[in-house]
Image (cartoon, grey):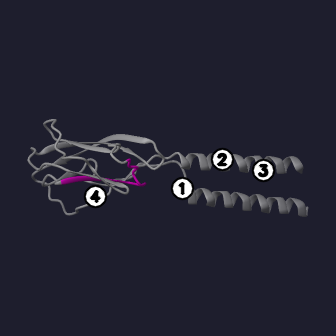
Amino acid sequence: MQGMKKLLVFLLATVCAVITTSSSHAHSQITASYPAANSNVNPIPQEVWIEFNGTLQTLDGQGINSIEVIDSTGIAVNFDTPIIDGPRITTKISSQSPLGVFTVNYRIVSEDGHPVKETYSFTATPDYVESEIARTAAPESDSSLSVGGALLVVFLIVFAVGILLKRKNEK
């Protein structure tokens, strides 16, 4: 009986360690953007923004977050320093570019202090009729559990172990 209790406690501790480790090391991910990745727009947008699932870090006088928009001719068409507002990074862009594929390069530093550097593209086409201003990007699947989900799993495991031990002691 003592060996069974030790094994269950060990398994519970292991599950808790795995759950909390995987959820605490998740980097920021895009929750919404305009234009969205692989979308079509018309006309060329006046600004590009990306919103993440956590607040972006800022340092006074340091350019740690960046966003660059490249048009179909390979020229950067964004203006000035990006605007950081909580989880969102925004840049104004020139509408004088030719239609075609635009590439958005970004580098952000998320709440956990880790830099995230990625690229996506969108297409400006003359025959596309857009009916929606802000498009939500499909978030990448994250195999780690949320903190609330992890706590629920831990509670259920503890509850199940408690019932098993109570039944074992009643026998």
Q: Residues within 10 Å of mark 3 (few under 14, many from 20)?
A: some
Q: Which mark is residue 135?
A: 4
Q: Which amino acid type is marked by label 4?
A: Arg
Q: Residues within 10 Å of mark 1 (few under 14, many from 20)?
A: some
**Circle 3: element type:** helix
Q: Which mark is residue 8?
A: 3
Residue under label 2: 17
What span is colored magenta in the figure? 47-59
In the displayed image of the protein, which residue is found farthest to the top?
74
What separation in Å lies between label 2 and label 3 (alpha carbons)?
14 Å
User: Residue 18: x and y, percent?
Assistant: 63, 46
What separation in Å lies between label 3 and label 4 (alpha carbons)?
47 Å
Position of 70 relative to 152 (above/below): above
**Circle 2: element type:** helix
- Is 134 a magenta residue? no
What separation in Å lies between label 1 and label 2 (alpha carbons)?
14 Å
Q: Which amino acid type is marked by label 2?
A: Ala
Q: Which mark is residue 146?
A: 1
Disc with the residue nearer the chain's start (3 vs 4): 3
User: Residue 148: x and y, percent?
Assistant: 57, 60
Report the front residue among 12 and 80: 80
- Is 48 a magenta residue? yes
Foreground: disc 3 or disc 1: 1
What separation in Å lies between label 2 and label 4 (alpha carbons)?
37 Å
Foreground: disc 2 or disc 3: 2
State the residue at coordinates (78%, 61%). 162
Disc with the residue nearer the chain's start (1 vs 4): 4
Q: Which amino acid type is marked by label 1?
A: Ser
